[in-house]
């Protein structure tokens, strides 16, 4: 297979080096968005547009690259919110060569004569407003990649709704094109105004202006700050032990099955900000509570799956860690599915308030040859009584931890 070349065009082909221009000239297959392919109208290569299923299109390239020189065109830099990682995922790193280039962030900051190493950069392209909500808590400049839903006008409306009335937006349109325009606007001026689809937004707050302080996500959240059904929440002290037993590492995927109000998954998101938490909850009213808590704290990396486990787990990416906080009579099947999907070294943690749950979880793990640990947690909290202080016990909980050994698992 001839290595596939992934070329970042920067802001336009004018940003290409002679070496990369020669790679494009020699291409026998050009792949990219229609706008990028239109830069080369006279090129004789076979042209393949990347449409709504880019991964499916990229899978076709392995056969073409067996005998042809394939070039994938990318805007900006392929590895900065670009197509580069997907090409590597589909074709394999050893079959791909990536040629970096300028990003829109670099170009915009160069036009504005401002440094950007301390700026917060997010992309709302195909993503949710939660990313912007979380980013507003950080100081300094905020640079935003937009899309047809998250337009400059809608971003201005989002900021106004949060009391940032004195903030200003800079909208950089068509960077590197003849129609390039960089405009500073108040939030009110941005509302309802039309912009080129190719735009980048820079948001600056006035000195002393800040987002109205809201609840801050932290480890050990008190139960009363979370929306939950009375009593159906993993208690603060239990959460601490569960998170310790999970031993979360950067970039990991966590399944929080039987998530209830999402308390464990919310706190876990702090420990894996570059990872992903899937909160699985079959009851719609509790899934709505998870959504309310996620939105309250602006957690961007928690996805809610409102469906019964274990059936819904088949559609989720393989996890490195699994917490089972519920499941009722299905707890054994849920644990088995978690065990099947976890890689060697993976960990599953089950909290059990019932002896039957403890027995099921422990038996499933030990019968499969996993390393098993059981912790009995009894928590008492102080409260005022007769002018003094007494202790009140919470319901005891067993925390079962299973670790998948290198030999695999028998399920």
Image: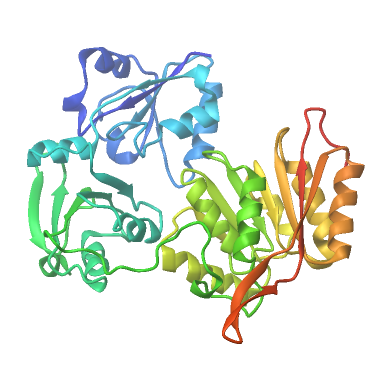
- Residue 255 percent coordinates (x, y): 64, 52
Is 98 placed above or below 76 here?
Answer: above
Q: In the picture, residue 385 is in which quadrant?
A: bottom right
Q: Nearer the viewer, residue 379 or 29?
A: 379
Q: Is 401 situated left or right of 220 in this image?
A: right
Q: Residue furthest front?
A: 387
Q: Residue furthest bottom?
A: 386
* Total numbered labels placed on residues in the image: 0
Q: Nearer the viewer, residue 87 or 215?
A: 215
**Residue at horizontal 54 percent and vertical 48 percent from the top:** 276
Q: In the picture, residue 135 is in which quadrant?
A: bottom left
Is 71 placed above or below 116 here?
Answer: above
**Residue at horizontal 62 percent and vertical 78 percent from the top:** 229
Is 33 placed above or below 15 here?
Answer: below
Is 218 placed above or below 287 here?
Answer: above
- Residue 14 percent coordinates (x, y): 16, 26
Query: Which quadrant is the C terminus positioned in?
Result: top right
Q: Nearer the viewer, residue 218 or 58?
A: 218
Q: In the picture, residue 376 is in which quadrant?
A: bottom right
Res 28 seen here: yes
Res 318 seen here: no
- Residue 34 percent coordinates (x, y): 32, 40
- Residue 196 percent coordinates (x, y): 18, 53
Q: Is 377 situated left or right of 27 in this image?
A: right
Q: Is 158 situated left or right of 181 in this image?
A: right
Q: How is the image coloured?
A: rainbow
């Amino acid at each position: 297979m001839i290595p596939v070349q992934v070329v970042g065009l920067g802001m336009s082909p004018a940003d290409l080096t002679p070496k990369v221009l020669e790679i494009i000239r020699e291409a026998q297959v050009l792949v990219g968005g229609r706008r990028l392919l239109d830069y080369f109208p006279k090129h004789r290569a076979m042209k393949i547009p990347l449409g709504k299923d880019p991964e499916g299109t990229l899978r076709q390239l392995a056969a073409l690259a067996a005998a042809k020189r394939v070039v994938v065109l990318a805007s900006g830099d392929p590895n900065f919110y670009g197509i580069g990682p997907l090409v590597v995922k589909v074709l394999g790193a050893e079959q791909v060569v990536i040629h970096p280039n300028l990003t829109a962030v670099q170009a915009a900051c160069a036009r504005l004569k401002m440094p950007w190493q301390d700026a917060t950069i997010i992309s709302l392209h195909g993503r949710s407003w939660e990313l912007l909500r979380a980013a507003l808590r950080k100081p300094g400049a905020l640079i935003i990649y937009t899309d047809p839903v998250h337009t400059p006008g809608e971003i201005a409306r989002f900021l106004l709704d949060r009391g940032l009335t004195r903030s200003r937006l800079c909208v950089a349109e068509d960077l590197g094109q003849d129609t390039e325009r960089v405009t500073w606007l108040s939030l009110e001026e941005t509302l309802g105004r039309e912009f080129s689809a190719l735009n980048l937004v820079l948001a600056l707050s006035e000195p002393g202006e800040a987002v109205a302080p809201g609840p801050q996500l932290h480890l050990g959240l008190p139960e009363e700050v979370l929306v939950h059904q009375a009593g159906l929440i993993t208690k603060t002290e239990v959460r601490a032990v569960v998170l310790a037993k999970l031993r979360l590492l950067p970039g990991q995927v966590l399944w929080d099955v039987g998530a209830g109000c999402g308390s464990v998954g919310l706190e876990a998101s702090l420990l894996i900000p570059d990872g992903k938490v899937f909160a699985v909850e079959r009851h719609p009213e509790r899934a709505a509570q998870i959504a309310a808590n996620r939105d309250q704290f602006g957690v961007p990396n928690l996805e809610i799956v409102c469906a019964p486990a274990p059936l819904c787990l088949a559609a989720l990416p393989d996890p490195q860690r699994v917490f089972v906080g519920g499941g009722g009579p299905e707890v054994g099947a849920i644990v088995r599915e978690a065990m099947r999907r976890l890689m060697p070294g993976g960990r599953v943690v089950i909290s059990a308030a019932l002896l039957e749950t403890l027995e099921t979880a422990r038996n499933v793990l030990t019968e499969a040859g996993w390393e098993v640990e059981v912790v009995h947690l009894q928590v008492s909290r102080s409260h005022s009584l007769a002018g003094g202080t007494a202790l009140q016990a919470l319901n005891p909980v067993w925390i079962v931890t299973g670790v998948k050994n290198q030999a695999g698992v028998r399920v």
